[in-house]
Image: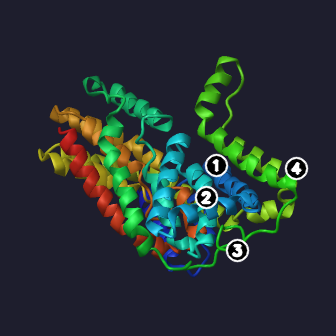
Amino acid sequence: MSTQLTICLVISLLAVIGFIHGKLPLGTVGCAAMLAYLFTGCIDEKTALGTIGNSNIVMVSGMFVISAGLRKTQFVHLIGKSVKAISKGSMAKVMLGFILASILAATLTGSALAAFAIVIPIVSATCEEMNISISRAAFCVGLACIASCGIVPVGGTLAMLAEINGYIDANEYSQYQLALTDLFVGRWPVLVMLTLYSMFLGWKIAPEKPVIETSEFSLGSKGPAAPLAPFQEKCGYTIFFGVTLLLAFSGPINSFFKSVGIPAVSAWEIVLLGCLLLVLTKVLSPKECFGAVNWDMAFLIIGCLCMGAALNNTGAGTLIGNAIASVAGRMRNNYMIGAMFFIIPFLLTQIMQNRSVMAIFQPIAILACKSMGVSCVGPCILVAAACTTSFMTPMATACIPYIMEVGGYDVKSQFVQSLLPAVLLSVINIFYVMTVFPL
């Protein structure tokens, strides 16, 4: 093991201890970790600065502002009252609606972060109407947004399919290309499990009230906002749903732009434009706009992104992946090999960026299967499932700090809620995928 890798692992361990200990703000720990990686050479200055300007940071911060704008309208409270009336006070029915809306939003946007930001204002308003703490629902809604990405064959799922087949082509094993519906065929039970778990169990396991104090604009139970003027009221929900639709259909829109020679528009640009319009139309004052951004959470995400980059730069993921490939090459049990290519990436993606883990483990899974002369479809689906199911720690994905902030969770309560769904997802993915797509 190299000295640089050892240093990186020590810093990462100290950062994780800092997150769990909770004596310092999470953003402070994240900022300290970023500087430690920078000063020890685990990341360079360009990576550090690039992380501060990462599109996820802009998206998270911007969607807090967009949600705050909708929060000031009466429209969101009307939706909450309607949901309460339809559900007749049944928490199971309410959670069913939340989860189906989350799955739809994640499918259309291809982004767990965008999906959660779209759904959570309505979830919050409904919880207020039913006198339920937002901490009861936030985790299950976030879990559905994260785990349902990359399943239904539209938008982001098709991009993931093309990426996996690209890895297969690059490693000259094209006889085992994934078909258009393979990701859905291999992962649809996850949608069923998430829905049932959230309806009947997940909200009961969640804390009865926020464990930590949430910020003013974190969508906790603050009561209805003072009515806006009619023009601002209409602007508030028009901008919110306009941003939502642009995020959901950004793929076809950018394809059209490309055909007529117009530059593509990124998701973070759409969100930033929405924030600007909220201020220009006076739905939010400049003070309210900047107050809606949670800087502690932003620096937490920055530190977590730097951790993933440092682990990737120092070769931690590749070292683990090569060891797995070596072991898998000596095994012949269908389910044991499947377990290796799900559990290890699943655990690693809790502390590294999922795109980096995917880039490391997809080629390793393909090469391991190629060396054994067996199909790589099942292991490739499992690696994809593992890398798109990051929800146990704040380092897992940018969506988790958002979930923790809205739900008022600390690291411990987030982790405790994650244990059972992590086990269920592991069992369902491994046994179902390796039965449907055996080696």
What is the distance, in whole Å, between disc 2 and disc 4 at their CAs?
A: 29 Å
Q: Nearer the viewer, residue 166 or 218?
A: 218
Instruction: Name the secondary structure under disc 1.
Output: loop
Q: Position of residue 121 (x, y in %)?
A: 64, 60
Disc 1: CA contacts within 10 A as few (<14), some (14-19) or many (>=20): some
| Residue 52 appears anywhere in the view | no
Q: Position of residue 391 (x, y in %)?
A: 45, 60
Q: Amino acid at mark 4?
A: Leu
Residues at circles 1 and 2 in contact by the CB criterion of under 8 Å: yes
Residue picked out by circle 3? 222
Q: Position of residue 165 (x, y in %)?
A: 37, 29
Q: Going from the N terminus, do you reach mark 1 or mark 4 first? A: 1
Disc 4: CA contacts within 10 A as few (<14), some (14-19) or many (>=20): few
Instruction: Name the secondary structure under disc 3.
Output: loop
Q: Going from the N terminus, do you reach mark 2 or mark 3 first? A: 3
Residue picked out by circle 2? 302
Q: Nearer the viewer, residue 375 or 51?
A: 375
Q: Nearer the viewer, residue 63 or 359?
A: 63
Label 2 vs label 3, nearer the camera: 3
What is the distance, in whole Å, between disc 1 and disc 3 at their CAs?
A: 31 Å
Residues at circles 1 and 4 in contact by the CB criterion of under 8 Å: no
Q: Which mark is residue 280?
A: 4
Q: Amino acid at mark 1?
A: Asn
Instruction: Name the secondary structure under disc 2.
Output: helix
Residues at circles 2 and 3 in contact by the CB criterion of under 8 Å: no
Q: Nearer the viewer, residue 143 or 258?
A: 143
What is the distance, in whole Å, between disc 2 and disc 3 at their CAs?
A: 29 Å
What is the distance, in whole Å, between disc 1 and disc 4 at their CAs?
A: 25 Å
Q: Amino acid at mark 2?
A: Ile
Residue at 26% x, 28% y is: 176
Q: Going from the N terminus, do you reach mark 3 or mark 4 first? A: 3
